[in-house]
Image (cartoon, coloured by chain):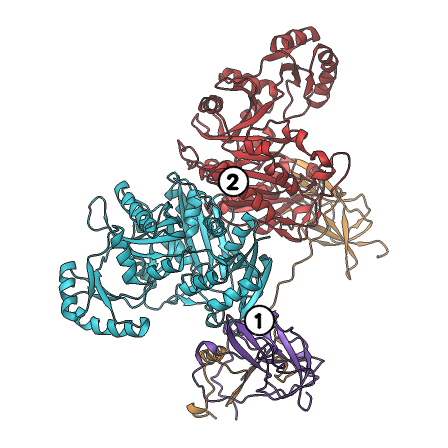
Chain colours: A orange, B red, C purple, D cyan
């Protein structure tokens, strides 16, 4: 059922207009009911009824800055992901990640490979200089996150390992 | 969009980003793990983490910086100052990989990176150098020293910067110093070669800003006075250098221009001189110190005096465009000062004071420029140098500039770390500084103030 | 009556527009219902919880009359402080607050005085121009917060009133 | 500590606070309820809430401003621009209460606040005015108009600013316009007196910055070109005015200096002129428009060109000290531009766009100054004018300044409200503007761009 035009609530612009007018008026309290509209304004706090808190404008929260690493990280710097209980093996520096010692060779590891802390999971190449990346922990490779030949950043996760005996 | 890899951090990273914005280039910042959340990383279009916090594992490794430039597909690498900025290896590696290096050619870096060859280049270009010369044994050292006149300095021929320099006030001291210096030179620079030259105990540090097009064309952008130094660390700079005669200015500028033209200098560079305030001649006695083959910390005083953007000019030149600086810049009107606000405690022997910044309020208003990477809640890391902000103030004359800088310091509020702001307030209020032309050893005799000497600490 | 389906709730930008206007307006409480929208804003913390409904003097909407030029002051602006259930009577503008009509006269009100909405609780003087401050609500004066002769700012609390019949 | 009551808001409040900091004065800000949490309120030593948000109940009430100055125990009241800044009543009330008003004397404000007496003062000082004069009936109006030559403007003798001005292109239009203008003048200014003067359809708006010591001494700080206007609202200003001949500059400056000296002008003021670009004479045809007896929005372009602090000079003079400006400022080197970033939608007929600001990033770098009161998360109130920020850029020449400003606009990011930034990018890229010397009606013919006319809206 469509109500007759006279019963329609005011448009948004009309409402803004009204508020602008009321702003400079001497009224301390205003209450307005129209079909489809209820407006109540007061200069006295606490006089408007209701139970929902005022919609505060969202202020973007500053993410806390992580403390800087004080020392050079060992290349195998692993971190535990909460819940998943997996160890991240990350890149020790920026460079190109290779999963194999040479283009024709087999990959250092595959998903399911068992590794010791010293097992290389790949190498990072910077200007022809190769830096092997050891697993850092004994266990089983469950995920390979970096592509062969991909440029990886420092601390970027390369592979993830389920440690021996869990965590 | 053409990309620029910025191989540096701190305020100069923010500064290069601003130049990229001016030119419509896309800045990509190489960061260490400690700088992931820095202002530069936020302002850049992209940040690439190249390595852990220590500079030896990140900013000091040319191969990582070039790898980052390749990863970013950058056309230009801007090295900033310090770190690898004057490393021939970085410039060469860039050239090998088709990346334009926003700095001089590798051979220029090599020539000026060595005191011996730099001095030789100066002599070739007819630039005045201090009396003295290389020697191979102690007897020869004494002979040269007697010719130059004591006191003298003993320096490593293949050294660079302020390292490994020894003062000898008389023959006895020279005899003691030479073997020490030789073994230090061998250890530090792989070569024991030394030279001896006249020492000027009451001299000013005045440097000339040059910008070469790489083909012998050189724009000279006046002088900066950087005499306010603490143990060879500049703290306060100004442009123009106060109180120099026109003949002295001409000698400085002409020397710098000849030297830069002679080597076909490319990009921004500084030719440093000592100006002897004792002699009373006109022009004053001027001797070549060294060339800084990069943009310098204190470049803003020249920019504000001349109304130019030196970093944008570096980037333009690197991209093969005209650098855009005026060919014959008119003499600057007015005066510009820069105070380096370091995270150091001037009351505790300038002990570094890294830590979590609380409030960071900087001045605003006419003629005021603030170059900083520090904002409220910034964690000022302990791994790098202590430069926190540069306050740059321009006014219609030196007196007005000093007054404006004092106001700017009052309006600066940084909590959470100690800073050198209070030191600057003291210096600017000092009659010696206000009179102009203090010498490089003035600050060490002036700070801390007499009444605070003897370990009273920060009670003023 | 069902609201007309054509009437869309305002967009987020339109809502921000309204909030921007309201934010800097003198209103302490605002409540707005439109089809698909309920908005409630209050400057008094805690009043939006709904545990103490505030039946403050609500002036029903009246036909708009031209605001009385420059002097249009919501001088009687009262506000309820959550918890204390008292109404704040605040200064309509910056000026010097006087508790008496003249130095020799008795104070307009004392602690314990019974007031109606029209009772003056004091005057604010600005450059010899006197602005009476009505209580704005009927009740009893329980606190006098501003000193006689003190410079008060706009919206500074002058006296506090326990409204008739409580809150 | 000497206190200054700042009787204004927005960016100029922040600007006056900066001048207080420079001079070691304590700034106290009068705020409306809408500005309690403004940047100015945070930066000031104290904020006093004088009344509710509408300006008619706060910033436009001299008695509240003086009351606030008394409450703050302020020695000086700085009125900023707009609001009560040129109200003789405020200056008088300050005088009555022993507060120094940082502006001209009340009688000066009164003289220049009325078009008739301002024109008379100009004529007395030998300043060229447009052909024309007062009239008492329509016949006389026609006679004067024929003498001056059509088109003409009909203005209220006792009016001020741009209000109540009517254009008449011929005799018929004049006959129609006169009764309307008379009744408007009666209604608006309480007096139906009118005058008619020659209209220059293709003129530039050029104004001269003066600073008087109140005793007949006047410093002249060159010209600003403010021809880029939308319906008499300035949008973009520059210093110096481009392309004027030395003779024209001398005519403008000499006229402004004589007028200011003649009235014993005190403090900062601007003498506005039209410069006719049609005539082709040297000097060009110059006619007096009006005097703005206050600091102006566009004062920073003069400050950056000359290296001075006009607001600090106002405060010094008000405190009875020498104003500190150079007596004979040298011609500025380089060029300065200012773009007004307004919270308006240039694609929607410049509809105001108040609201909650999200991001507010402003440019940084050499020669860049940003005067703003806006920070991230600021609620831009709908009660006042829409000026959000002023970007000021200085470079060694006009071409470099335009390029630098384009970069500065690119580096500006404001979300949450619409702004005029995109308009400025369009203007700065326009060949007419780059060639210099557009007229006051250029913008209205240039914006919106042809391809966007006809209600396409914000799709570019």
With respect to residue B345, does D149 lie above or below? Answer: below
Of D149 and D377, the residue lying toward us: D149
Residue D261 lies left or right of residue B103; in this view the side is left
**Disc 2 vs disc 1: which is toward the camera?**
1
Of A26 and B23, the residue lying toward us: A26
With respect to residue D342, does B149 lie above or below? Answer: above
- Give x and y (percent) for residue C49: 68, 80
Residue B308 location, quadrant: top left
Which residue lies under the disc numbered 2?
Answer: B401
Whether labels 2 and 1 share one chain? no
Callout 1 environment at 10 Å: few (<14), some (14 to 19), or many (20+)?
A: many
- Give x and y (percent) for residue B69: 57, 41
Which circle marks residue B32 in the picture? none
Do the CB atoms of the residues marked 2 and 1 lie less than 8 Å apart?
Answer: no
Residue B179 location, quadrant: top right
Query: Which residue is most to the right?
Result: A165
Residue B106 lies left or right of residue B137; in this view the side is left
Q: Chain of mark 2?
A: B
- Is residue A127 among the parts visible in the rendering? no
Which residue lies under the disc numbered 1?
Answer: C96
- Give x and y (percent) for residue A147: 65, 50
Of B172 and D77, the residue lying toward us: D77
Residue D446 lies left or right of residue B184; in this view the side is left
Real-space CA distance between mark 2 and mark 1, rounded to the nearest whole angstrom:
43 Å
Q: Quadrant of the C terminus of chain D?
A: bottom left
Q: Chain of mark 1?
A: C
Query: Which residue is most to the front?
Result: C104
Is disc 2 placed on a helix, strand or loop? helix
């Amino acid at each position: 059922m469509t109500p007759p035009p006279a019963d329609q609530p005011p448009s948004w612009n009309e409402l803004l207009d009204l508020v602008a007018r009321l702003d400079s008026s001497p009224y301390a309290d205003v209450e307005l009911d129209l079909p489809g509209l209820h407006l109540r304004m007061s200069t006295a706090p606490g006089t408007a009824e209701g139970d929902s808190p005022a919609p505060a404008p969202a202020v973007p929260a500053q993410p806390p800055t992580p403390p800087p690493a004080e020392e050079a990280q060992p290349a195998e710097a692993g971190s535990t992901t909460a819940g998943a209980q997996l160890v991240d093996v990350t890149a020790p520096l920026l460079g190109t990640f290779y999963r194999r010692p040479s283009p024709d060779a087999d990959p250092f590891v595959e998903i399911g490979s068992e590794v010791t802390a010293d097992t290389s999971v790949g190498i990072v190449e910077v200007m022809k200089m190769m830096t092997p990346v050891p697993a850092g922990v004994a266990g089983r490779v469950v995920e390979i996150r970096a592509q062969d030949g991909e440029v990886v950043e420092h601390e970027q996760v390369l592979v993830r390992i389920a440690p021996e005996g869990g965590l | 969009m053409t990309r620029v890899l910025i191989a540096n951090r701190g305020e100069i990273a923010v500064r290069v980003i601003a130049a990229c914005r001016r030119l419509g280039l896309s800045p990509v910042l190489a960061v260490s793990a400690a700088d992931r959340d820095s202002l530069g990383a936020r302002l850049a279009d992209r940040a690439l983490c190249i390595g852990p916090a220590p500079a030896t594992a990140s900013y000091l490794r040319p191969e990582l910086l070039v790898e980052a430039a390749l990863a970013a597909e950058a056309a230009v690498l801007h090295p900033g100052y310090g770190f690898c900025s004057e490393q021939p290896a970085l410039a060469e590696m860039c050239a090998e990989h088709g990346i334009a290096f926003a700095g001089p050619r590798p051979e220029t870096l090599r020539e000026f990176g060595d005191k011996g060859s730099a001095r030789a280049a100066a002599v070739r270009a007819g630039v005045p150098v201090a009396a003295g010369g290389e020697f191979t044994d102690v007897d020869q050292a004494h002979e040269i020293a007697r010719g130059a006149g004591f006191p003298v300095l003993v320096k490593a021929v293949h050294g660079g910067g302020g390292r490994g320099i020894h003062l000898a006030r008389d023959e006895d001291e020279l005899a003691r110093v030479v073997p020490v210096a030789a073994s230090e030179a061998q250890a530090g620079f792989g070569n024991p070669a030394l030279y001896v030259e006249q020492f000027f105990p009451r001299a000013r540090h005045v440097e000339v800003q040059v910008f070469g097009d790489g083909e012998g064309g050189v724009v000279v952008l006046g002088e900066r006075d950087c005499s306010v130094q603490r143990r060879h660390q500049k703290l306060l700079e100004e442009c123009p250098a106060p109180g120099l005669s026109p003949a002295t200015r001409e000698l400085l500028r002409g020397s710098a221009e000849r030297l830069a033209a002679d080597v076909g200098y490319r990009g921004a560079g500084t030719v440093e001189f000592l100006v002897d305030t004792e002699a009373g001649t006109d022009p004053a006695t001027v001797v070549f110190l060294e060339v800084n083959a990069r943009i310098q910390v204190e470049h803003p005083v020249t920019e504000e005096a001349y109304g130019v953007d030196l970093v944008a000019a570096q980037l333009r030149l690197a991209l093969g465009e005209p650098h855009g600086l005026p060919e014959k810049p008119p003499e600057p009107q007015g005066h510009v000062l820069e105070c380096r606000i370091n995270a150091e405690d001037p009351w505790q022997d300038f002990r570094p004071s890294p830590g979590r910044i609380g409030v960071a309020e900087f001045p605003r208003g006419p003629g005021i420029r603030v170059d900083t990477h520090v904002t409220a809640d910034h964690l000022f890391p302990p791994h790098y140098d202590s430069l926190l902000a540069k306050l740059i103030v321009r006014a219609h004359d030196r007196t007005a500039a000093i007054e404006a800088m004092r106001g700017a310091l009052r309006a600066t509020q940084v909590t959470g770390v100690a800073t050198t702001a209070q030191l600057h307030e003291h210096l600017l209020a000092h009659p010696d500084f206000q009179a102009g032309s203090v010498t490089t050893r003035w600050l060490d005799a002036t700070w801390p103030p007499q009444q605070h000497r003897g370990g009273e600490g920060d009670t003023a």
